[in-house]
Amino acid sequence: MGVLNVTPDSFSDGGLYLDPERAVAHGLELARQGADVVDVGGESSRPGAEPVSEREEMRRVVPVIEALSPHVRVSIDTVKRAVAEAAVTAGATLVNDISASLWPVAAESKVGWVAMHMQGEPRTMQQDPRYDDVVADVVAFLRTRAGAAVEAGVHDVWVDPGIGFGKTTAHNLALLHRLPELLSVGFPVLVGTSRKSFLGRLAPDDSGQPSDAAHRLPGSIATATWAMLAGASMVRVHDVPSAVQAATLVGDVHLPQATGGPVGLDEGQSLKTTAGSKR
Ligand code: HH2
């Protein structure tokens, strides 16, 4: 899933694609680079972001979705029902919902739905996030919401742990370490770590400051690869070519071997030897 933010203030690509023509060109480029889905958003959800009016959000996303949807699957990244409906009318077939509450729209419109976990709301979510057990809380929440969506008749349901949404670095790492627990809920898992600030905190620059968004590609791809190896079915990324390369490698590692030998990363087996044995 390639990210296309049609916003002035998104944390890493804000302002780059506010012009519809540039947004469409970038969306087509993401598809050409190998994105299966282009995720169009008209409101930033970065920590501290201010909400945008329904009218303005629609004005940003609808023309872009109309132009892209004949060429690539489009998801709409919104928490507003009216925006989701307008986006589906414009051609989006997946509602990417960081509020995990728009499943009735997906049910009525017969499109897919991503339920993402978030503690609090973007303006304040990073102030002091706390959990007894972040993984157990996220799994229980997503199980309930995904179940409600299935009951309402949504056929294409995804769950997403919401990396960075009301979570400390330790919470994010716990969710990655224990991703198989989320898989056990029984829905395909989407993970978005791309360029997020915890990667900057884990990899400070030479002056000891957290690295900025432009310097978080290694961590973005490492965590995307980690999520894919743990079983995630989709990763949400800004840098599609690098993620496609990682996905190709992970996909190769999981292919059944013609010799009937062990598949995947067994004990004592390195990624290199497993992939190399088939080439
Ligand atoms: N992260 C962001 C936005 N939408 N949707 C899902 N399902 N999962 C995520 O992890 C996720 C998401 C935040 O990233 P970005 O869109 O790059 O920034 P901004 O919210 O500032 O527009």
Image (cartoon, helix red, strand yellow):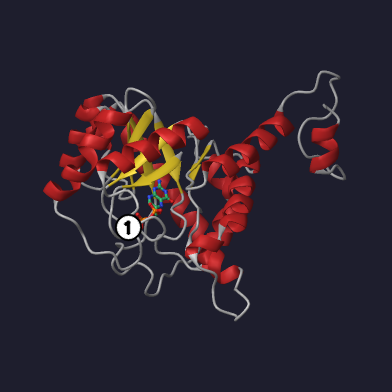
Q: Residue 118 location in percent, x, y?
A: 37, 56
Residue 92 appears anywhere in the view: no
102 relative to 171 in the view: left or right: left
Quadrant for the C terminus in the image: top right
Q: Residue at x 46, y 38 (%)?
A: 1
Does mark 1 have its CB less than 8 Å from ligand 1?
A: yes
User: Which image quadrant is residue 201 in?
Assistant: bottom right
**Identity of the residue furthest to the bottom in this view:** 207
Q: Residue at x 57, y 55 (%)?
A: 217
- Comparing 18 with 181, the one in front is 18
Amino acid type for the residue under numbered disc 1: Ser
Q: Which residue is mark 1?
A: 45
The correct choice, above or below, for 93 with respect to 137 in the image is: above
Q: Residue at x 49, y 35 (%)?
A: 188
- Comparing 264 with 214, the one in front is 214
177 relative to 117 in the view: left or right: right
Residue 103 appears anywhere in the view: yes
